[in-house]
Image (cartoon, helix red, strand yellow):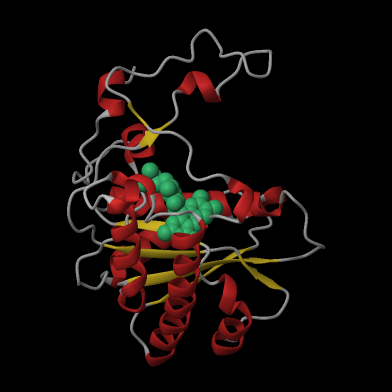
Amino acid sequence: MADMHDLANTDLSRSDVGLLDGLCSTRAIRRYRDEPIPEPMLRDILFAATRGPSGSNRQPFRFVVLTDSDRAQAAKKLIAEGAQKMWAFKRKNDQYDEGSGAKSDSPKARMANVMQTYVDNFATVPALILPCLVRYRDPTPMEGASLYPAVQNLLLAARALGYGGVITGFHGTVDEELKKLLDIPQEVFIGCTVTLGKPQGGHGPVRRRPMSELVFGDTWGVAADWAIDPPGTSYTKAGPPPAKQSA
Ligand SMILES: Cc1cc2nc3c(=O)[nH]c(=O)nc-3n(C[C@H](O)[C@H](O)[C@H](O)COP(=O)(O)O)c2cc1C
């Protein structure tokens, strides 16, 4: 039986994590040390990704892994430009510099700083991965379920090996150019981008809404009796409202 206290408080710098600890402590990592990911590590991380589930075990996922070749660097630069444009829009649209964001030590301002540094350095992230879906039928709302579990496997394997990463939608504005540059067929869906590297600096615990707000019994909106967070769980509210097209 898992120790519930540990589940809420796993030390992120540990790489010898158990599965359940890893699931509950994996954060979005956007700051990386300036060091490449050795190929055996990339192999293990991507192996775990390719073990992900998919509908009928069709395995429609493919992973384009960009490190330091000329072509990879050109693709990273292209996505970095998209990232900078998208973050500039989001920063304004979600009012990151207003309200508490005007105070440089507020969580909102700190998040804006992390994001700015992330996009400014995006072209030099140690590895940038494009998880893709080879479509075999018209798009359906469930098709991502044959790709994103593999992406989560990738992130959890990275965590297990002392690396970290984050899912982004930063390829969105440069999708067509990217496909041309990397010979990705038109019908292939680039599901997201994932940046990976050795985490730099400290990262706090995973913060989410209380379980009782998210897990219901047999009635929508009514928490299951057993939906009780472990002691020491850290909380946060949901992110910015979805109305203005946010990630
Ligand atoms: C569908 C999806 C899209 C995301 N898009 C972006 C993105 O474009 N840029 C980014 O920096 N993070 C992006 N993220 C990362 C989320 O912001 C992050 O997972 C969330 O804030 C929780 O972070 P935490 O686990 O560190 O608490 C995305 C995550 C998901 C699942």
**Above or below: residue 247 compared with residue 75:** above
User: In the picture provided, is 141 more to the left or to the right than 182?
Assistant: right
- The residue furthest bottom is 70
Residue beneath the point at 47% across and 22% down: 211
Task: Return the x and y of residue 47 as percentages of the image width and height.
Answer: 43, 59
Task: Report the front residue among 171 and 85.
Answer: 85
Picture quadrant of residue 100 = top left
User: In the picture provided, is 53 more to the left or to the right than 39?
Assistant: right
Task: Return the x and y of residue 172 as percentages of the image width and height.
Answer: 58, 70
- The residue furthest right is 138
Task: Return the x and y of residue 190 as percentages of the image width and height.
Answer: 60, 69
Residue beneath the point at 31% across and 33% down: 21
Task: Return the x and y of residue 117 as percentages of the image width and height.
Answer: 29, 67
**Above or below: residue 86 compared with residue 54:** below
- The residue furthest top is 225
Residue beneath the point at 56% across and 12% down: 224
Q: Is residue 51 visible?
A: no
**Above or below: residue 237 compared with residue 160:** above
Task: Report the front residue among 108 and 221.
Answer: 108
**Above or below: residue 167 compared with residue 82:** above
Quadrant of the drawing holding the N terminus? top left
